[in-house]
Image (tube, rainbow, N blue to C red):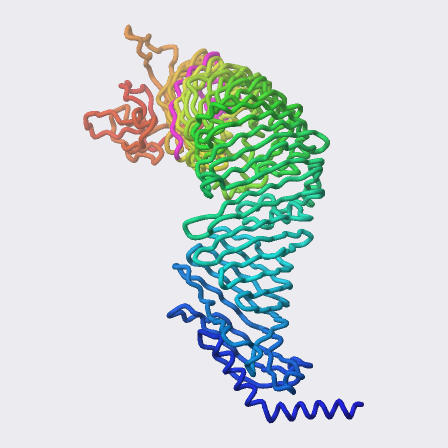
């Protein structure tokens, strides 16, 4: 038996070897009758084993040229192409090609801008019967393996890319009718239409049955299926392909779920929903009818919905249950986005055991109009986990929502939403926002939507430790939500028991100070959205900020274009009352400008210095001072991104009156023991002190002032000088030597005069000296000073614009040749010569 088999194989191999040239010649001759375009082949050979048990003509390195003129892109390339026929046909000298196998290739189908294809490469000759030809195609099977496919339609801006892993097909030709059956696995990289990509990275199982009538130029799609995962999509109908594409197709989804439907959509439409899954019955069906060309779209009518389904997201561990809905989509009579309609009806379900229901109608996708109705009883924790909001980290509590919106979307965005109504009732809701470390908690109240505005009615809650009760209106709310760069205006009355600015100004935990331009370790920041505006009446019982403990804050706060302003704010703090008006400009996050005019009345000095942490110095502190301060302060203060003051930019004018003042245990006074008793100097008291102080270029300028104290031997002390932020002092004191001989003031109210001791206090807080002021003494007596000390040098005459620009301008005087050693802020006074003064080269040191 084996000998017979070997004999047959040997005879067949011998016959092939002797007849291969004739067989290959007949194949090439017959193939050329079916081809319109050239085909390049690297090598052709006849093999008994490549497609065993069939005999095969194997073509290596095949390149098929496309049919478009001047087109250099090949229609197809293949590493190997096999044409197989039965051995019995070989013995009978009837060469019938029964199978075609194509492996490791690439097919590039293209249509140019005029709609002409590059695949018109075959021509069918039916004049002769297949039985009359010595060589003919009678295909029983076609196999494709590892074939990449691309499709580009320049006229419709469509592209397709994928590859066939394994595909089996049969081709039957009877006269003008060609029947194709195909089944296999295909991977789709993307189907791109204009800018949208569908079916991205999807594996398809394709089973199709086509009947092509070349005479009527129509394709009959017999019931065929495309399977994506567990979902099956059925297709049937007809396709007319000449002179224009005309579709009449029916589509139906079976065993579908939400992920299989979302998988068909482009990322811009499904990116927020792509992770959701469903259980239960989800269905869709529809028709596509009409011409499909560059100018005309077919009519689309689809119905979809679900019955007792559940939707969930594996990551969030929440699901909507018992969901029912009925939906429809059509592109309307004009087959365009202008007549398109999306309709969702009878929507109902449960989320966390709480019901929701509603409906949606969306018409005219180019200039859309919407009709929305929604009722929901919400568990906030479950709702925010089921459908996360980027700005919200988490939420708790319950809420009831009722919403009705109708009208063109353009009117909603423009603020003309006359048919918008809604109500949101909050019950003990807590919300943790991602941008802030402090949570909003214990929110209770009601918000009502009327047109474009939202009314807040008794909305209470906490932000960190700070509480609030708000009644007012959010104006332009709908436009602000729907349109970028729209402004939300809040007009409200805010009452609060406590505002804790240590929390309210604290940096969010997720943001570093380096991004805000603040210093390392900075803990505060002030950021205000450009799209937020405020007009708020405040009534705060208590406020905290560092050491400040304020009470009864009243006034108006406004915000426009990132500038906070107030015409009047009043507060009780540090044992007195203060009122403030001014602006805070945060348009530049790393350069916050605070311009204010503040007045205070009967504020205890020791409390003031304690609250403001001794103003950053340790020379004169809260333990040194007593008395009641009444003052007006005009200031321009600049802060960096972490709300640290930029002291080199600070400018201020302080008009102050101190009554019943005390200066206790002040070190420089202890060095005046020769003038007065140390115990008296330790507790220096004065009834009233008035003066104006100026701040610029990190320096405090003190014009000349009179201090009338309880010390008999120094009952009138005149002081002037400067004190820098680096704690460099340059004070000049004038003390009467014979206070009992002082002349009375003149009728004009001038200062009494007499012999005085002139002293200079120079140095810093830890290292200072008190010496006889020789330079000033020479100035007073008319003598030319030997050398002016650097600290006593006159200030430059140029000043920065701002508060001091109109205050510190130098006064024009005759040029007498004398050096003026006092600060430029102090007006010149005529002073008589003192009775006693040190000899040249001598000085007093106490």
Q: Quadrant of the C terminus?
A: top left
Foreground pick, 642 / 181: 181
The image quadrant that residue 675 belongs to is top left
- Whether residue 497 is visible, yes or no, is yes
Give left or right: position of 31 versus 761: right
The image quadrant that residue 498 belongs to is top right
Query: Which percent across, then down, holds residue 757?
Result: 37, 21
Q: In this rendering, is residue 753 above or below 434?
A: above
Number of marks in picture: 0
Residue 784 drawn in magenta: no
Q: In this rendering, is residue 153 above or below 566?
A: below
Report the residue at 58% width, 43% height from top. 272
Q: In this rendering, is residue 178 above or below 335?
A: below
- Whether residue 680 is visible, yes or no, is no
Q: Which residues are magenta?
A: 649-677
The image quadrant that residue 631 belongs to is top left
Query: Which percent across, then down, holds residue 59?
Result: 55, 81
Give left or right: position of 1 versus 624: right
Query: Which percent across, then down, holds residue 834?
Result: 31, 20
Q: In this rendering, is residue 119 above or below 366?
A: below
Query: Which percent across, then down, holds residue 402?
Result: 60, 25
Foreground pick, 214 / 387: 214
Report the residue at 41% width, 32% height from top. 724
Residue situated furthest right in the rendering? 1
Q: Quadrant of the N terminus?
A: bottom right
Residue 672 drawn in magenta: yes
């Amino acid at each position: 038996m084996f000998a017979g088999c070997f004999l047959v194989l040997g005879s067949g191999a011998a016959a092939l070897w002797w007849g291969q040239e004739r067989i290959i010649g007949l194949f090439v001759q017959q193939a050329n009758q079916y081809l319109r375009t050239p085909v390049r082949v690297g090598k052709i050979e006849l093999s008994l084993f490549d497609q065993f048990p069939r005999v095969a003509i194997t073509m290596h390195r095949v390149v098929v040229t496309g049919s478009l003129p001047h087109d250099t892109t090949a229609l197809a390339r293949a590493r190997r192409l096999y044409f197989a026929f039965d051995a019995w046909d070989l013995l009978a000298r009837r060469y019938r090609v029964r199978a075609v196998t194509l492996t490791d290739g690439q097919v590039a189908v293209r249509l140019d801008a005029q709609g002409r294809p590059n695949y018109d490469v075959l021509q069918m000759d039916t004049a002769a019967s297949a039985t009359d030809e010595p060589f003919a195609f009678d295909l029983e099977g076609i196999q494709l393996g590892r074939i990449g496919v691309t499709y580009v339609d320049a006229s419709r801006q469509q592209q397709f890319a994928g590859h066939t892993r394994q595909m089996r097909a049969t081709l039957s030709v009877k006269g003008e009718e060609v029947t194709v059956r195909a089944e296999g696995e295909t991977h789709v990289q993307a189907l791109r239409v204009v800018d949208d990509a569908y079916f991205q990275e999807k594996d398809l199982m394709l089973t199709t049955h086509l009947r092509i009538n070349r005479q009527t130029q129509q394709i009959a799609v017999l019931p065929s299926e495309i399977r994506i995962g567990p979902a099956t999509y059925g297709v049937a109908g007809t396709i007319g392909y000449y002179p224009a594409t005309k579709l009449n197709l029916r589509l139906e989804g079976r065993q579908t779920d939400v992920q299989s439907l979302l998988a068909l959509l482009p990322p811009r439409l499904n990116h927020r929903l792509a992770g959701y899954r469903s259980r239960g019955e989800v269905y869709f069906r529809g028709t596509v009818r009409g011409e499909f060309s560059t100018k005309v779209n077919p009519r689309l009518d689809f119905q979809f919905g679900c019955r007792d389904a559940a939707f969930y997201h594996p990551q969030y561990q929440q699901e909507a249950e018992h969901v029912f809905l009925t939906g429809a989509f059509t592109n309307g009579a004009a087959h365009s986005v202008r007549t398109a309609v999306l309709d969702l009806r009878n929507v109902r379900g449960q989320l966390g055991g709480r019901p929701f229901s509603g409906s949606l109608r969306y018409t005219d996708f180019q200039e859309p109009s919407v009709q929305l109705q929604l009722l929901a009883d919400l568990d906030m924790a479950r709702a925010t986990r089921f459908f996360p909001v980027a700005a919200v980290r988490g939420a708790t509590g319950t809420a009831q929502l009722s919403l009705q919106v109708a009208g063109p979307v353009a009117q909603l965005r423009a603020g003309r939403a006359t048919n918008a109504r809604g109500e949101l009732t909050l019950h003990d809701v807590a919300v943790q926002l991602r941008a802030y470390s402090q949570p909003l908690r214990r929110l209770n109240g009601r918000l009502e939507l009327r047109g474009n505005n939202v009314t807040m009615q008794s909305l209470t809650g906490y932000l960190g430790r700070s509480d609030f009760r708000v009644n007012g209106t959010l104006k332009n709310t709908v436009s602000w939500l729907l349109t970028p760069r729209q402004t939300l205006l809040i007009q409200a009355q805010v009452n609060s028991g406590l505002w804790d600015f240590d929390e309210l100004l604290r940096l969010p935990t997720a943001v570093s100070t380096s991004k805000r331009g603040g210093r390392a370790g900075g803990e505060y920041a002030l950021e205000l959205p450009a799209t937020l505006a405020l007009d708020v009446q405040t009534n705060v019982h208590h406020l905290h900020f560092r050491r400040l403990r304020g009470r009864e804050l009243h006034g108006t706060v406004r915000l426009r274009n990132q500038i906070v302003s107030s015409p009047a704010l009043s507060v009780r703090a540090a044992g007195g009352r203060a009122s403030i008006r001014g602006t805070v400009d945060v348009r530049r996050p790393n350069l916050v400008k605070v311009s204010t005019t503040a007045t205070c009345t009967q504020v205890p000095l020791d409390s003031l210095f304690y609250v403001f942490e001794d103003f950053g110095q340790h020379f004169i502190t809260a333990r040194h001072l007593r008395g009641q301060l009444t003052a007006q302060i005009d200031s321009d203060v600049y802060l960096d991104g972490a709300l640290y003051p930029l002291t080199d930019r600070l400018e201020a004018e302080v008009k102050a009156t101190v009554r019943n003042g005390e200066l206790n245990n002040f070190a420089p006074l202890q060095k005046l023991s020769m003038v007065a008793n140390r115990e008296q100097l330790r507790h220096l008291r004065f009834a009233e002190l008035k003066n104006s102080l100026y701040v610029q270029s990190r320096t405090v300028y003190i014009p000349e002032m009179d201090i009338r104290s309880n010390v008999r031997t120094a009952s009138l002390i005149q002081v002037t000088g400067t004190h820098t932020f680096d704690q460099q002092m340059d004070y000049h004191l004038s003390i009467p030597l014979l206070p009992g001989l002082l002349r009375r003031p003149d009728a004009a109210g001038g200062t009494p005069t007499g012999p005085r001791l002139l002293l200079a206090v120079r140095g810093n807080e830890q290292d200072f000296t008190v010496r006889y002021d020789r330079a000033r003494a020479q100035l007073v007596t008319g003598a030319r000073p030997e050398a002016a000390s650097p600290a006593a040098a006159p200030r430059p005459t140029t000043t920065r614009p701002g508060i001091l620009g109109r205050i510190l301008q130098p006064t024009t005087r005759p040029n007498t040749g004398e050096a003026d050693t006092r600060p430029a802020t102090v007006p010149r006074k005529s002073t008589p010569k003192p009775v006693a003064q040190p000899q040249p080269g001598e000085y007093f040191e106490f």
